[in-house]
Amino acid sequence: MTHATKLSERLKRLGSILRFGCLRDARGSSVLEVALMMPLFTLILLGAAEFGRLAYYSIEVSNAAYAGATYAAQTHATAANTSAIQLAASADAANTAGLSVTSTNSCSCSDGTPISCSNAAIFCLSPARIVVTVQVNTVATVNSLFNYPGFPSTYALHGQAIERVEQ
């Protein structure tokens, strides 16, 4: 063997040793990077799940208000039946615990003049007609699954729907 051949074999061995050492170091650093970033990824994943959960309950509370207002808008008798309005709203949001439902009626003349419902027939003269609207408000308190620093542990979600009562 010549001196050049021996030197080239040594360089090949040295190159393979250096390449193996570089790969081993790179693998170790990538494991370390994943280990350092995993808490951040977990926090982002939990935050997204919590946000989705709150969005779901917010939609439930809003839909409950709409269901109550839709029930109340059928006739003047259903608009005055607050317990049935509460039952209709609560039935629509069966997955939401602690739902609070309130409803109010308001009257006006068809020409736009606001009047009180008790004396609507006196103040709303022909050809104007009495227009009755019902407003249903819903509120539910939802507890957070995880306590994040700087964020509240409970959230109050509100829903509102206004419908015109059929004449």
Image (cartoon, rainbow, N blue to C red):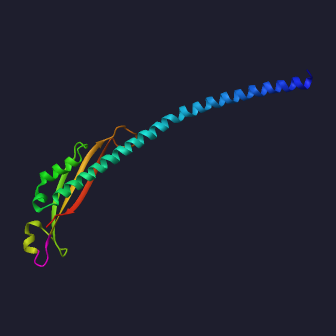
How many numbered circles does the render carry? 0
Q: Quadrant of the C terminus?
A: bottom left
In this image, 158 relative to 9: left or right?
left
Residue 149 image offset from top left, x and y in percent: 40, 40
Could you tell me which residue is drawn at 68 percent across and 30 percent down?
A: 23
Name above or below for residue 67 compared with residue 40.
below
- In the orientation shown, which residue stands out farthest toward the right? 2
Name above or below for residue 38 compared with residue 73.
above
Q: Which residues are magenta?
A: 124-130
Could you tell me which residue is drawn at 11 percent across and 62 percent down?
A: 76
- 167, 34: nearer the viewer: 167
Q: Quadrant of the N terminus?
A: top right
Residue 92 image offset from top left, x and y in percent: 22, 48
- In the orientation shown, which residue stands out farthest toward the front? 1
Give the quarter of the image for residue 105.
bottom left
- In the orientation shown, which residue stands out farthest toward the bottom? 127
Could you tell me which residue is drawn at 25 percent across and 56 percent down?
A: 160
- 150, 119: nearer the viewer: 119
In this image, 35 relative to 25: left or right?
left
